[in-house]
Image (cartoon, grey):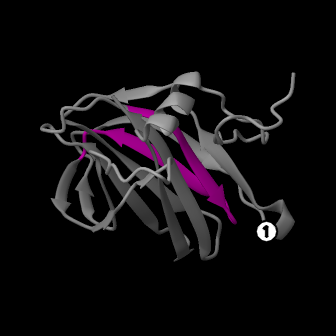
Amino acid sequence: MGFANPPVSYPLNTYGNPIVDRILGQKILDGKAYITPHRIEDLANGSSESIYFSNPSDSGKRIHIIAIIVSSLAQAFLDIYKNPSVTANGTQLTPVNLNLSVNTPSAVYIEYGGTYDISSADKIYEDVIPGGKKNRAVGVLAELGENIVLPAGTSFLITLTNNSGAASSYAVHIIHYEV
């Protein structure tokens, strides 16, 4: 049985197949699923950019991370830390509701470009993102298990470090839903 005309659009894994999560599909229809895209342009070799993702302690929500998708034109290291400290705020990102007919904002706080202290944080994921150019550009799905749950008061930091030997561009997409 194929996926012709699925009722909702699903994110794709690294092989181009849909990540079929019936709960996610329902959350999209209910207006409780979001994507947060961020493009990093001309990141110098040896430099890093971080994205801070927080479920505020007063949100009253439980956040389910479905996927962290990284597209790259060059090799990079990907590290994810649980509960880092923010020492200087960056630029806020706004999650987009995956049901474009619903205007319900997300409960999460997301930013990039701040200053973060990971000395007391736990590294929960690390990977090498492969690179490529034009029709060979590649990406990777950072799977932290089938579904990561962030209770209120929990945060994580995604840090992408260019180690390709030259400046390059990357894109990071975080897909989540809220309960």
Which residue: 67% across, 35% down?
7
Question: x, y percentage for residue 9?
Answer: 65, 42
**Residue with the mark numbered 1:** 133
What is the span of residues highlighted in magenta in the rendered image? 64-84
Is the N terminus in the top left, top right, bottom left or bottom right quadrant? top right
SS type, badge 1: loop
Residue 95 horizontal side relative to residue 109, left or right = right
Question: x, y percentage for residue 81?
Answer: 36, 41
Q: Nearer the viewer, residue 5 or 50?
A: 5
Do we see residue 35 in this rendering? yes
Do we see residue 43 in this rendering? no
Is the C terminus in the top left, top right, bottom left or bottom right quadrant? top left
- The dominant secondary structure in magenta is strand
Reply yes or no: does residue 72 show up in magenta.
yes
Which residue: 20% across, 65% down?
89
Residue 70 horizontal side relative to residue 85, left or right = right
Answer few, some or many: residues within 10 Å of disc 1's Cα (few below 14, many 20 plus, some between 14 and 19): few
User: In the rendered view, would you say 5 is above or below 87?
Assistant: above
For badge 1, the amino acid type reads Lys
Which residue: 60% across, 76% down?
167
Question: x, y percentage for residue 13?
Answer: 70, 38
Q: Nearer the viewer, residue 51 or 130?
A: 51
> Seen from this angle, which residue lies furthest front?
101
